[in-house]
Image (tube, rainbow, N blue to C red):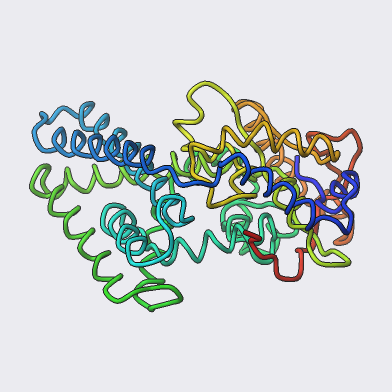
Amino acid sequence: MQANLVAVAADNQPNLQATNEYAELKRQILALGLMKRQPGYYAAKFAITGGLLAIGLYALAYSGSDAWIRLAEAAFLAFVVVQIGLLAHDLSHQQIVGAGRWNVTAGLILGNLLMGVSRAWWRDNHDTHHAHPNDLAHDPNVNIIFLGCTAEQALSRPRWVQWVIRHQVALIVPIFCLEFFSMHYQSIVYAFHGKRGTVRGEHVVLLVHYALYGTLLYVTLGIGGGLIFALVHHLLTGLYMASIFAPNHKGMPLAEPTAGPPDFLRQQILTARNVRGPLVDLIYGGLNYQIEHHLFPTMPRNNLSRAQPHIHAFCAARGITYTETGVVRSWREILGHYTEVSRAMAPSASRRGPGAPLATVHPESAYPVATPRGPLRGELSERL
């Protein structure tokens, strides 16, 4: 269930030494060598992902016309596209190479050319999320139009959107399927308006992606078959992406105003959820170690699992709640939270008045807290 970050943080006894605590943790991680780049690991990841892409394209070009085979190909290419996106994500965080020309060039290839997603839009969107996790005023990941994080947020939306949010649990799969379409739309708007971080020719590379993608589908499947394949491929890609993103923060505490500067260490830990289970590292691309990733975004993906026991022990020694669950429990918490929000939108719930909080219980606590109504004000920087 969603909880009040301030209430949970108070339970975890944050203090004025928070910055020093983070510096101490960072010293431990650096001493273990976990921030060093991993060229061998990423060379293998690029080779494997490139091979999978080649297999998918070959199958698309030379397989038969059986509908089930085409569906399997769409699902396979959806998996490959998300794997490319995970590499682009790591590149954006400078886990593979540092900032500079090589990073920009590789980002244009992975994001704009292969995915049709603007590298500049992604960096702006994702960096904002990292700086303000679960902040209703600033984090774009908790401002998705068809999902309500609080009843107050949901009731501020247009009436037809409110209807969707009232049924957001039943509609969760189609909502998730729209993710990749949304990324394309936002990328086009961002790149063609030359917003912050765009480079010369970025919109042109996006156009090249659409031209190549459309030509490939037209040549292999024709107009009708190509349109159907593209629709299914994009729906499955969006579903997979959203299924990776959702367990990271959904159903975790939201940020609220604080009396002083934000506590970077606790906000990054308390708003994130780790997910464990068989094959989770592969399927989630390392994002299942969300706590470690948010604390150290430049840490190479394959070192996140090595950092996990050290960060877990660090939190335990200081009484900081460290949330880690299995896949099934993470989804029970997410869907449970969305159900609470939808119920709170009902007329009977609204009669409590606009100031009445919705009582919920944080997964790791035994006491009710109030679902937050206000965002965290103030700038939060990534302290690396």
Q: Nearer the viewer, residue 160 or 213?
A: 213
Q: Is residue 255 left or right of residue 356?
A: left
Q: Nearer the viewer, residue 72 or 11?
A: 11
Q: Is residue 192 left or right of residue 135?
A: left
| Whether residue 36 is situated above or below residue 379 in the rendered picture | above
Q: Is residue 220 left or right of residue 147?
A: left
Q: Nearer the viewer, residue 12 or 195?
A: 12
Quarter of the rendering occupied by the C terminus: bottom right
Residue shown at the point (34%, 38%) measured from the top left: 45
> Within the image, what quadrant is residue 193 found in?
bottom left
Q: Position of residue 169 (x, y in %)?
A: 61, 39
> Within the image, what quadrant is residue 257 found in?
bottom right
Quarter of the rendering occupied by the N terminus: top right
Q: How many marks?
A: 0
Q: Position of residue 269 (x, y in %)?
A: 72, 46
Q: Position of residue 46 (x, y in %)?
A: 30, 41
Q: Position of residue 271 (x, y in %)?
A: 71, 48
Residue shown at the point (90%, 41%) measured from the top left: 368
In the current view of this chain or complex, which residue is farthest to the top? 278
Q: Nearer the viewer, residue 287 or 187?
A: 287
Residue shown at the point (56%, 23%) measured from the top left: 277
